[in-house]
Amino acid sequence: MPKLVNLLVATLPLTCLAAEPLMPTADGTTWRYDMTQEAGEEFGFSDVKPGPDGKVHSLAIYRLSGTQDFEGKNLLKFEMHRDGMVATTELATVDDHGIAIAARIDQYGDLTRLDPPQITVSAPLKTGATWQFEGKVGDTIAHQEYKVIGEEDIDLPAGKFHAFHIHAEQTAPLQMTIDRWFATGVGIVKDVTEIRMSDGDLLRRISLELKEKPKVAARPEAKPQVAKKISATVGNGPIGEAATKFDADTPKIYARWAGRGLREGAKIRAVWIAENLGDVAPPNYTIDEASTTANGPSTHGTFTLSRPDEGWVPGDYRVEFYLDADLVETVKLKILK
C-alpha cells in the first residue's frame, strides 16, 4: 500500500503539467476559416464583387509561421492569408496569462506597435471574467472592454465545439463590437466583428467560422506586398509641400490624396478627427467628413476644412482616408497655439 500511495503522489505533478494548452503553438499550425464580409448600404467593396446575397465569401487562413524578434523579444508570428496574400501579421505571446498582441504588420509591410500589448484572450477563461485594453495602436488611442458572457456548444463546419463566448466593445477610435467563441486547446472557432459609423450605421461586418480543425501545414504561396492604393498628405494649399503643424489662424487645411489601381466608382472618404482637445471635446471626436467617387484607376483630389469663426482649437488631429469601407491611410497633424 505505501508503494501505491507514493506512486500516486509522484504522478500528481505530471498530471498538472499535462493540462490542456490554451491553443496550439507548434510551428506551422494552420487554422482555415470560412470568411463572410458584409458592407453597409452606403459602402461597397474596393476590390471584389459581392455574391447574390450582397456578401463576399472567401477562405481565410491563419497560420503560425515561426517567430520574429520585436524590441528584443522573440514573439510568435501569426499570419492571416486572404486572396493569395498576407493581409495581416500579428506578433504575439501565448502563455498561461492568455494571448497578447504586441504589434501588427499590415499588407503593405507597415508595422504598428500596441502599447501595452493588447490582450485578446485572458486566461484562465471563466464566465464573468472581464478585462480591457486602454492604450495606443501606433499613435492612436484605443479603448476596448471584454467580458466572457458564458460557455456555449457551437456547431461549425469544422465540427462541434464547447467554447467560451467573449464579447468586446470598442469605443475608440471606431465603434466596434467583437463576438468571439474560443475553444480551449483549439483557438478561435468563430468570430464576428462589426464596425460602425459614429451615427451607428454599419460600415463593415466580418464573420469567421472554423472550416476544419487546426493542423500543421505548409505555408500557402503569397503574393509580394502591394503598394498603397491611397496615399495622402495635408498642407496649406491644394498642392505644394506637406505639413504636420499649423497655426491656430490657418485659414484652411487641405487633405490631398492620390489613388492608384482604383475601380471606377470606388468611394473615397475623408474623416477629420480631433484626437485630444482637452475639455473642449471628447477624445477622438469626429469634426467633419466628406466623400467623392473615383472616375478612373488613377484619380486624385482634395478635401478642405476651413477654420472655425473662433479659430482652431490647439491640439492633436488626424485625417482618416477610407476606400469604400476600408481604412487605408491616416495622416496626423497638430494645431499650435
Image (tube, rainbow, N blue to C red):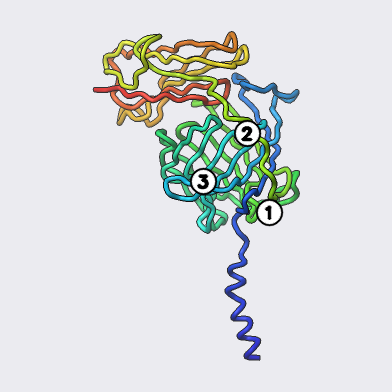
Q: Which residue is mark 2?
A: 206
Q: CA distance from mark 3 to mark 1?
A: 32 Å
Amino acid beneath label 2:
Ile
Task: Return the disc, 1 or 2, that comes first in the chain's sequence.
Answer: 1
**Residue at screen point 54% across, 53% down:** 94
Q: CA distance from mark 2 to mark 3?
A: 28 Å
Amino acid beneath label 1:
His
Q: Which residue is mark 3?
A: 68
Tag shown at residue 86: none
Q: Quadrant of the N terminus?
A: bottom right
Q: Nearer the viewer, residue 127 or 185?
A: 185
Tag shown at residue 162: 1
Circle 2 SS class: strand
Circle 1 SS class: strand
- In the picture provided, is 199 more to the left or to the right than 56? left
Q: CA distance from mark 1 to mark 2?
A: 22 Å
Disc 2 crowd rating (10 Å Cα; few below 14, some 14-19, many 20+) is some
Task: Give how far across and how far down residue 237 sits, in percent.
Answer: 36, 10
Amino acid beneath label 3:
Gln
**Residue at screen point 38% across, 31% down:** 283
Task: Give how far across and how far down residue 109 sits, in percent.
Answer: 52, 32
Disc 3 crowd rating (10 Å Cα; few below 14, some 14-19, many 20+) is some
